[in-house]
Amino acid sequence: MSDVADRVRKIVVEHLGVEEAKVVENASFIDDLGADSLDTVELVMAFEEEFGIEIPDDAAETIQTFGDAVKFISSAQ
Amino acid sequence: MFDLTGKNALITGASGGIGGSIAHALHGAGATVALSGTRVEPLEALAAELGSRAHVLPCNLSDAEAVTALPKQAAEAMGSVDILVNNAGITRDNIFMRMSEEEWSSVLDVNLTSTMRLCKGVMRGMMKARWGRIVNISSVVGATGNPGQANYAASKAGMVGMSKSIAYEVASRGITVNCIAPGFIATAMTEKLNDEQKAAILGQIPAGRMGDAQEIGAAVLYLASPEAAYVTGATLHVNGGMAML
């Protein structure tokens, strides 16, 4: 995967304290990586900062998995 | 105790008696303050009185865009907003049978909706900092009701329910959200009451006197302090015993 994926993975690992190997394409932040709803808000905030983009609330709601995040950010850049 | 050195506080309604006392209390404990209100002159006067560490940010709370911009302006002026005190409020009293939709919505807009907007505006910074204090100034009337104030009482009770809900959501991030419910506080507004009205009010207050604005400032200082980290979702009643809740 791309550079975006590596940076997103790093943020997820740091924020949620999960093993890097678990952060796979279909990994759901809430169901698989132990995030609560506030964690997902904070992840979006961290993505916005890392990539210098703005993720509106309705778009943020569609970002459920690691793959979703990478896809969204790649297209937003 | 109650040292706020290095903390930045945004206070709405700072041009009023209670807001001014809140600003004095937080500033006196070392905080940098951003003073907001509709009237620029009293804000400038208060800032001059406080000296350093005081910023003036006029804002009309019935203007949604201005409200949304206020936390950003405060963060730009001070570096961050660590403490938010929603103190501004208006009344448009009328008996319920005669209360217009406009009287209802203007009070709800300024007292409740602007509080929501400001809470939202400061949350991101507080979440990141893993520290934050929100103190919403409610009223005894929100808990007891008051004839002629269905709109005001609803806005102040709404503040309590909203604060508790936000408190739940952000407690794990080191952010507390509390309310203070003042009873009768001696301000320019209560000075206009005649002796008969004053006597009637005092008859309801076990302490036998009106509260001093400084007594609200002290309560805010406590809830804003690091020492109050374990107090959240609470309503602190400061009313001389007139309603023991």
Image: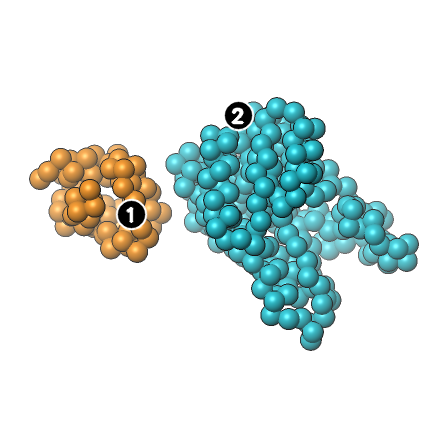
B206 lies left or right of B105: right
**Residue type indicated by callout 1:** Ile
Q: Is residue A3 at all visible to an observer of this figure?
A: yes
The chain under label 2 reads B
The chain under label 1 reads A
Residue A31 position, x and y percent, is 23, 52
Q: In front here: A8 or B225? A: A8
Query: How many numbered circles are shown?
Result: 2
User: The chain shown in orange is which?
Assistant: A
User: The chain shown in cyan is which?
Assistant: B
Tag 2 residue: B6
**Residue type indicated by callout 2:** Gly
Residue occupying the point 69% across, 55% down: B140
A35 lies left or right of B230: left
Report helix, strand or loop for mark 2: loop
Residue occupying the point 49% across, 41% down: B71
